[in-house]
Image (cartoon, grey):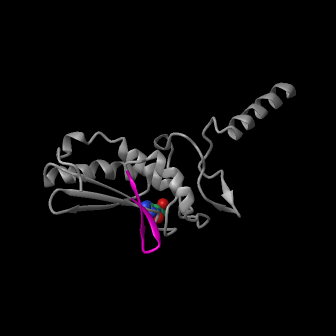
Amino acid sequence: RNVAFTFRSSTRVTEILQDRVDVPSNRNTLNGFRTFCSGKDLSAKKCVSCSSGDMRPMTEQAANQLIQQVPEWNLTNDGGTMKLSRSWKVKTFLEGLEFFQAVANVAEAEGHHPDLHLVGWNNVKIDIWTHSVGGLTENDFILAAKINGLDVQHLLSRKPAK
Ligand SMILES: C[C@H](O)[C@H](O)[C@H]1CNC2=NC(N)=NC(=O)C2=N1
């Protein structure tokens, strides 16, 4: 029995080391602070609570890596605060609000909330960052990936967003 157990755990360690499995999002720590964890499919992850005071914003280098998993989004630096941003053009004002409702459902489910802009009646822009740490955490990329997965095509104008 011991032999089987040892085999199973070392297999798990090997999988984790080779990055073949997802592990809980709070696994990686740097100097005792959570940063983010590696893993393939961001949209399959859940946002973790970022209010416990042990979370710090990720480095620009880490953000440049993770953005490759959500290339539809832009990395911006807003007066020193790193954010994710994406724009869409909707067909009508009301469809903009429908778009927001779909995003709000995801945000509520994740307990992680983006800034929503609807400007000039049909320009939707969403900014995501972790307010409590003043920068980006893996939660922001998870939310971005989940917003990418929404079926909102029918709400969008055929004209590209600015
Ligand atoms: C307790 C709860 O997790 C926090 O208040 C959450 C709510 N949603 C949030 N959303 C975002 N984007 N950043 C936060 O810091 C944040 N804080």
Residue nearer the viewer, 94 or 122:
122
Q: Is-magenta flag for residue 82?
A: yes
* 68 to the left or right of 1: left
Q: Residue at x 83, y 31 (%)?
A: 6
Q: How many marks?
A: 0
Residue 118 x %, y % = 22, 61
Q: Position of residue 151 (x, y in %)?
A: 29, 39
| Residue at the bottom extreme, as displayed | 79
Q: Nearer the viewer, residue 97 or 79?
A: 79
Q: Quadrant of the C terminus?
A: bottom left
Task: Find residue 117 and report its horizontal and vertical position in percent.
Answer: 26, 62
In the image, is 152 to the left or to the right of 4? left
Regarding ligand 1, which quadrant of the image does it lie in?
A: bottom left
Residue 129, percent from left and from top: 44, 62
Name the residue located 78 percent from the left edge and 34 percent from the top edge: 10
Q: Which residues are magenta?
A: 73-84
User: Viewed as shown, does residue 43 lie left or right of 85?
Assistant: right
Instruction: Compare residues 66 and 137 and report the one nearer the observer.
Output: 66
Quadrant for the N terminus, please: top right
Give the dominant element type of the magenta stretch: helix, strand or loop: strand
Q: Residue at x 17, y 56 (%)?
A: 122
Asked if the magenta segment contains residue 71, the reply would be no
Task: Pick whichever, 133 or 64, lies toward us.
Answer: 64
